[in-house]
Image (cartoon, helix red, strand yellow):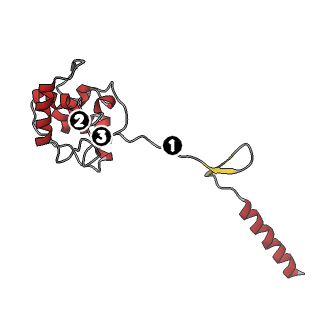
């Protein structure tokens, strides 16, 4: 009798523990439990921040409706010489791809990142987030002039 009572008590205890729910699941209206979905944060390279002008010497950039082909060609030369060690036009590499950058960033932000990368990663949250996303690889200051940076920006418009 004592053994039966012990077995019955053990069975009830196991039944109670096995029926306990996890706080990681959420009950739906029809009684089944589904995992709670975690909110996935969008990567900084895909985030759209068109009002952020960044930190640096560029406060305003006017883009003509038509791309300046001569300036873009010069920008392509500068980009190929100074930027392709870390950036590829068509894909993520050591740094983000510049393709479609002006759909995600303001022209001022792009130029300030080119001209002032050290201060940008210290004070601009988006630049900080990009640094984290790209494994702490900071953008090197290539010491471009404003005219060269503007030419690179014009080239980015052609990608």
Spatial CA distance of label 2 from label 3 is 8 Å
Front residue (pair 124, 73): 73
Residue under circle 3? Answer: 128
**Count of marks overlaid on the render:** 3
Mark 1, secondary structure of its residue: loop
What is the x, y in percent for residue 8?
84, 73
| Mark earlier in primary sequence (2, 1) | 1
Q: Which quadrant is the C terminus positioned in?
A: top left
Front residue (pair 11, 90): 90
Which residue occupies 11% across, 39% down? 142
Mark 3, secondary structure of its residue: helix
| Mark earlier in primary sequence (3, 1) | 1
In the rendered image of this protein, does residue 43 appear above or below residue 107? below
What is the x, y in percent for residue 110?
23, 31
- Within 10 Å of the Cα at label 1, are there few (<14), some (14-19), or many (20+) other Cα atoms? few
- Within 10 Å of the Cα at label 2, are there few (<14), some (14-19), or many (20+) other Cα atoms? many
* Front disc: 3 or 1: 1
Mark 2, secondary structure of its residue: helix
Spatial CA distance of label 2 from label 1 is 28 Å
Q: Which quadrant is the N terminus positioned in?
A: bottom right
Which residue occupies 38% across, 42% down? 43
Spatial CA distance of label 3 from label 1 is 21 Å
Which residue occupies 17% across, 45% down? 84
Disc on res. 39: 1
* Front disc: 2 or 1: 1
Residue 53, picture quadrant: top left
Residue under circle 2? Answer: 120
Mark 2 in CB contact with mark 3 (< 8 angstroms): no
In the rendered image of this protein, does residue 139 appear above or below residue 21? above
109 vs 68, left or right, is: right
- Within 10 Å of the Cα at label 3, are there few (<14), some (14-19), or many (20+) other Cα atoms? some
């Amino acid at each position: 009798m004592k053994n039966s009572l012990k077995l019955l008590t053990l069975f009830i205890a196991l039944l109670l523990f096995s029926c306990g729910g996890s706080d990681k699941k959420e009950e739906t209206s029809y009684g089944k439990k589904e995992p709670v979905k975690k909110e996935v944060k969008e990567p900084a390279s895909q985030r759209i921040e068109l009002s952020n002008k960044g930190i640096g010497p560029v406060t305003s950039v006017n883009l003509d409706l038509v791309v300046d082909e001569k300036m873009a060609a010069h920008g392509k030369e500068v980009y190929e010489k100074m930027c392709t060690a870390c950036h590829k036009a068509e894909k993520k590499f050591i740094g983000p791809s510049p393709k479609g950058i002006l759909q995600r960033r303001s022209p001022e932000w792009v130029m300030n990142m080119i001209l002032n990368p050290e201060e940008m990663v210290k004070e601009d949250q988006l630049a900080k987030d990009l640094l984290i996303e790209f494994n702490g690889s900071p953008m090197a200051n290539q010491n471009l002039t404003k005219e060269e940076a503007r030419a690179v920006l014009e080239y980015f418009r052609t990608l």
